[in-house]
Amino acid sequence: MTYKLNRRTVLRTGTAALAAPLIAGRARAQGTPLRFTQFYAPGGEVPAQVAWFENLVASWNATHEQQVLLEYVPAGDYMGGRLTTLFATGEGPDIFLLSPGDFLRYLNGGALADISQFVPDIVKADFSEGVLASRMVGDRIYGIPMEVEPMAMYYSVRAFEDAGLNESDLPSTWDDMLSLGERLTTDDRYGLLFDTNPGFYQNFTWYPWFWQAGGAFQNADGGSAFGSPAAEAALGLWQNAVALGAAPRQILGGGGWDIVPNLGSGFAAMQNCGVWGIAALQDAMPDEPFGVFPMPTPEGGAATSVGGGWAFCANARGGNPEAAAEFCAWALASEDPASSARMVDWCTVAKTNIPPRASALEAGAEALQSGQMATFTNEILPTVRAEPRMPPEVYSAISDAIQAAMLGGTAPAEAAATASDRIDAFLATYDGAPIL
Amino acid sequence: MSLSRPQSWSRRSRERLAGYLFLAPDALGLLLFVGIPMVLSLSLSLYSSNGFGGYRYVGLANYARLWSDPQFWDSLRVTLSYIGMLVPALYVSGLGLALLVRRTNLFNGVMRAMLFLPQMVSLVVVGLVWQMLAADKIGALPRALAGLGLGDVSLLGDPAYALISVTVVSVWFLAGFYMLIFLGGLQDIPQMYYDAARIDGAGPVTRFWFVTLPMLKPTSLFVLMTSLVASVAGAQTFDLIWVMTQGGPADSTSLTILYIYEQAFQFGAFGYAGAMASVLVAVLLLVTVMLFLATAGGRVKGVT
C-alpha cells in the first residue's frame, strides 16, 4: 500500500497534530485536582489545624468527582508576597485564604469567583452581617469567612500584683489606660504595648481606637473623612503612650500579634492583641496567669473592637471556578449541619476564635463561654466591627500616618491631614468596588 | 609535508576563542538572569499592571507618577543617606582591617577567619540577633547605653537612630568580605615600592599615602562600586532591613528597594515597580560611569 501525500493529507495531519495537545490539555484540566493554597496544612505546626484541613478535604474528595489538593505555604511567605506572585504569574491557586486587608485588590483585579449561587439565603442570614458584608459587593458573595478574630487588651496578673493592683484597677478610659501604663512601666518592662511594625496588621489594630473616637474613612460624598478630630485623637493616643515611655517603640517576636514574646515574657504588662492570644499564652506558659478586658474608650466614646479573620475564596480564573466556589460554600456555608459543625470545630478546637455563624456560636457555646473566651463572647463580640476593606493606596496612607505620629513625632493633626489628602487624591480616580 | 598547524587558525585566534569559551558560561548566566530580566523590567515599566495578569500600555505614565510620588523621593533620600554612611564605612573598615591582618601568620589567619565569619551566617539570623541585642529596655545595647546615663534609647524604634543602627549592622556583616578584597589588592603591590620608599626615608604614614593607596586604585574602584550596588540593591541590604525594621520606624529605613518590593509584591503594581527599578538602575549606572571617569577606570598611572 502506498501512502499518497497531498495537500489535503498534510492539512488533516497538521490539524490533528495541533488539536491533540489541546484536547489532551482540556482532559487534563478536568482531571486535575483543585489546588487549595493556604498556610495551615499539610505542613503546619499545629496538629489540630493540620487535621482540620485534611479532614475537610478528605470529606469533599470522598463525595465529589472534582478532587481538591492541599498546598501548604508557610505563613510568612504566604503573606509576604507568595500569593501575589502566584496570581501575577498566572499560577494562582483555585482556592485560597484571603484577609479583608487584601480583599479589594483581588476583587478589583477580577480574581474572585462569585460564590453566592451556592449559599442558601437561610445560611446567609446565619452569618454575622458585618463580617459577611465585607466580602460582598451588592448581593454577590466573594468569600466565606471562616472565623472572627476580635481585638482586646490582655494583662499580666503577675505584673498587676507586683504593682499592688488587681482586676478592679483595669482601665475603662484612654486616660486611665495611659496612667496605668505609666504606673506599670519599670526599668525592664513597658506598661502598655501596641503594634509598632508598619503593615496591614498595625492598621487593623489601630482602627478600633479610631472608631471609638467617632472616626470614619469616607464622608457621604465619597471623599476622605480621615482628616478628622477622631483620627487626631486616635493617633494622639498611640503617640502619647510612646512619648510617656509607657509603650515601646519596637516590640519583640514576630510583631504585635505575637503575644508570648511580649506580654508572656514580661516585656509588657498590658498588650493589645486578638483572641488567638488566649491559646498562644495557654500553650506556651500554662502556669502564667493572664486576663482579658475590652479595649478602653475615650471619655464618652462607644465601646468598639475590630474583628479580623480569613475567608475561603475561589479563583475566578482557575481551572474550575464553579467547583472551587462550590467547595468554599460546601465547607463553611451550606445548610448541612456538618458545615456549621466544621466551623465550630475550627474556632474552638483547632483555634480559639469566634465563629461568624449564629448557629455555630450556639453549638460551640460550651467552649465559647469558658474561661477568658467568655469575655470575648459576651463583652467584646457585641462591639465588634468587621475589619475594613480598602485598596492598597488607602491602607498605605493610613499606615504612614500611624507611623509618623506614633514613632516619627509628627503632630497627629498634621499626619491625619496628610493621609486624608492622599486618600482624596486616590479616591478621585478610584472606580473599584466600594470601600467598607 | 608541513607539520605546522593550519595558518587560518593563528595562535592569537585560538587564544581569543578560548577566552570567549571561558567567558561563555558566565555571560550566558548574566544574560539569562540579569540582562533579559532588566530588559523585561524596562518594558514592564511602560505598562500598568493590576497584579492579576492584566497589563495595559500606559507609555511613560509610571514615570510621571514616580516624579510626583513623595514616597519615592523620600525613599531615594533615605537610600542616599544610607549610601553616604555605608560606602565610606565599608571602605575604611575593609581597608583598615586588611592592613591590620596583612602579615601572614597564625594569629592573623585566625583573625581573618573570625572577621569573615559573619558572612557564614544567614542574613535573617543576623537581623534577628541584632534585633534582640537592640531590643528596647532589655537588649544588651540599650542597657549599656542606659548604664552610661543616656536613658531609654530605642536603637531600631527611633527614626533618629534606626538608619545609623542598620548601617552599623551592615558594616559588621560586610566588612570581612571587603577586607578579603583589600587583602588581595595589598598582596598585588610589589615589595620593591616599599623598599624604595624606605630607602628614601618614608615612614609608615607616607608609605601608606604614596605607595599603598595609589597602588590600591583598581581594588578601591571595585570596592566602591560593589559596595555601592550592595547598598542600593543588594540582597544584604534588603534582607537585613526587612528583618530588623521592615522599613520603619516612620519610613526612616525605607530604602527605594523596599518601596519597590512593597509596590510589586504586596500591591501587585509591577509596572510602577518596574519604572522605579529602571530609574534606580539608571542612577547606579550614572554613578558607576562617574566613578570610572574620576578614577580613570581604576588604573594606576605608570604601572601596566
Image (tube, rainbow, N blue to C red):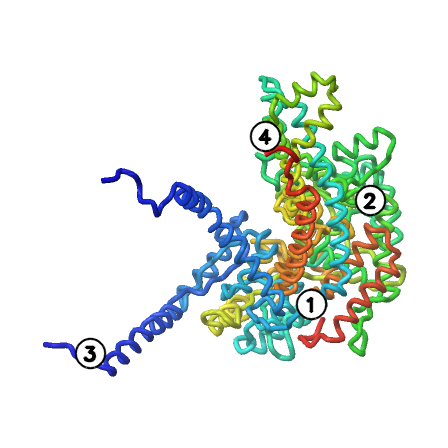
Disc 4 is placed on an element classified as helix
Q: Chain of mark 2?
A: B
Q: Are marks 4 and 1 in contact (CB under 8 Å)?
A: no
Q: Amino acid at mark 4?
A: Gly
Q: Residue at x 83, y 51 (%)?
A: A408
Q: Which quarter of the figure has residue B145? A: top right
Label 2: how many Cα within 10 Å (few below 14, some 14–19, many 20+):
some
Disc 2 is placed on an element classified as helix
Dot 4 corresponds to which residue? B184
Look at discs 3 and 2 and give the one toward the viewer.
3
Q: Position of residue B136 (x, y in %)?
A: 77, 39
Q: Are marks 1 and 2 in contact (CB under 8 Å)?
A: no
Dot 1 corresponds to which residue? A391
For marks 2 and 4, give the CA distance.
37 Å
Dot 3 corresponds to which residue? A5
Q: Is disc 2 on the same chain as disc 1?
A: no
Q: Position of residue B250 (x, y in %)?
A: 78, 52
Dot 2 corresponds to which residue? B160
Q: Amino acid at mark 3?
A: Leu
